[in-house]
Amino acid sequence: MKATVKWVDGMMFLGESGSGHTVVMDGPPDAGGRNLGLRPMEMLLLGVGGCSSFDVMNILTKGRQAVSDCRCELSAVRADATPAVFESIHLHFVVSGKALDPERVERAVQLSAEKYCSASIMLGKAGVALTHDFEVVEV
């Protein structure tokens, strides 16, 4: 896997993934940015949510669950010192669908957390406290 981050100006950077997708990263005005893009740590948090959501949906789809919506709400706490690393991250899944089996949803979230999500497992090994929970919404 490869990627490139190119400085644009001020504190704005353009990230390009190996698959050819781009994203703008920028800092807040008090740090020389113009607030025109995501902060790099926001991207990292979104990456954890995206990675885990991918796993959960993959597992539920293979398990023939009729999912109509899946949302991962993330909350994180960062250290109040430099470096301001993540101390904890909580992933709350809201899975909607028809006749969903809560035990299968729970198992999908658990498998992502413990076996499949490279991003969250890597951060956990680095000392970030990761927690997960879920709710099922019948539609």
Image (cartoon, rainbow, N blue to C red):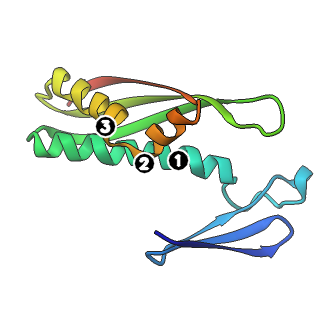
**Residue depth check, mark 3 versus mark 2: number of the one nearer the observer:** 3
Q: What secondary structure is marked by label 3?
A: helix
Q: What secondary structure is marked by label 1?
A: helix
Q: Amino acid at mark 3?
A: Lys
Q: Is residue 95 left or right of residue 45?
A: left
Give the residue pinned by disc 1: 46
Outermost front residue? 125
**Quarter of the image that includes the C terminus:** top left
Return the x and y of residue 82 as percentages of the image width and height: 83, 38
Q: Amino acid at mark 2?
A: Gly
Check disc 3: other Cα within 10 Å, few if <14, some if 14-19, many if 20+.
few
Return the x and y of residue 33 as percentages of the image width and height: 84, 60
Give the residue pinned by disc 2: 50
Residue at mark 2 to residue at mark 1: CA–CA distance: 6 Å
Q: Amino acid at mark 1?
A: Leu
Q: Is residue 121 visible?
A: yes
Q: Residue at x 58, y 49 (%)?
A: 44
Query: Do the residues under discs 2 and 1 have CB atoms within 8 angstroms?
Result: yes
Return the x and y of residue 53 as percentages of the image width and height: 35, 43
Q: Residue at x 77, y 76 (%)?
A: 8
Q: What secondary structure is marked by label 2?
A: helix
